[in-house]
Amino acid sequence: MRLRFSLSLLGDMAVVRCVGAMVRGTETDRLSHTIHELLSKHANCVLVISDDCSIDAYGIGLLVRAVAEAKSHGRKFVVVCTEQRLLQLFELVGLNSELEIQPSETAALSALQVAA
């Protein structure tokens, strides 16, 4: 399934919701560029990964770059994910210790408000 994403701006927070395959390609490049732009203009960013989303090494790289960029700007990048196979993948590649993962968009937004 091709990657699709939507964007919502909530004050100084941005929420990006993804559905589909976060794999090497034009749509994932667009997502990466969007996250880069958001982190340079907004205090914090939430990436909501749908349960039917799949991620390859390119998608993992996108997440790693987003975390590094957020840290370099003194900002937070939070991922919302409940899909067990993706959570296991994050653990397998050591990303679970780098990512702040929340179980819902509400929890992610609350975590960002507490951090502010």
Image (cartoon, rainbow, N blue to C red):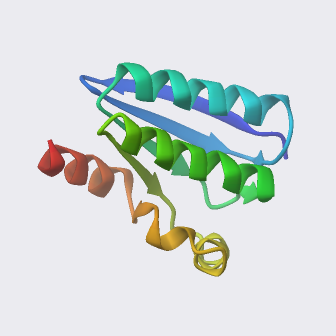
Between 72 and 20, the one nearer to me in the picture: 72
Q: Is residue 86 above or below residue 19?
A: below
Picture quadrant where residue 111 is located = bottom left
Measured as percent of width and height from the top left, residue 82 is found at 51, 68
Residue at x 43% of width, y 29% of height: 39
Q: Give the residue displayed 48% in from the left and 49% down from the top.
A: 67
Q: Left of 75 or right of it: where is 55?
A: right
Which of the two residues, 87 or 50, is positioned nearer the viewer here?
Answer: 87
* Image position of 22 (left or right of 48): right
- Front residue of this view, candidates 97 and 103: 97
Image point (29%, 51%), residue name: 106
Q: Residue visible at 83% across and 28% down?
A: 26
Q: Position of residue 2 (x, y in %)?
A: 83, 40
Residue 103 lies, in percent from the top left, at 40, 65
Does 99 appear above or below 13? Answer: below
Locate residue 12 relative to residue 9 in the image: left or right: left
**The C terminus - image quarter:** top left
Number of callouts: 0
Q: Where is residue 64 in the image (x, y as percent from the top left)?
A: 58, 52
Residue furthest to the front in view is 72
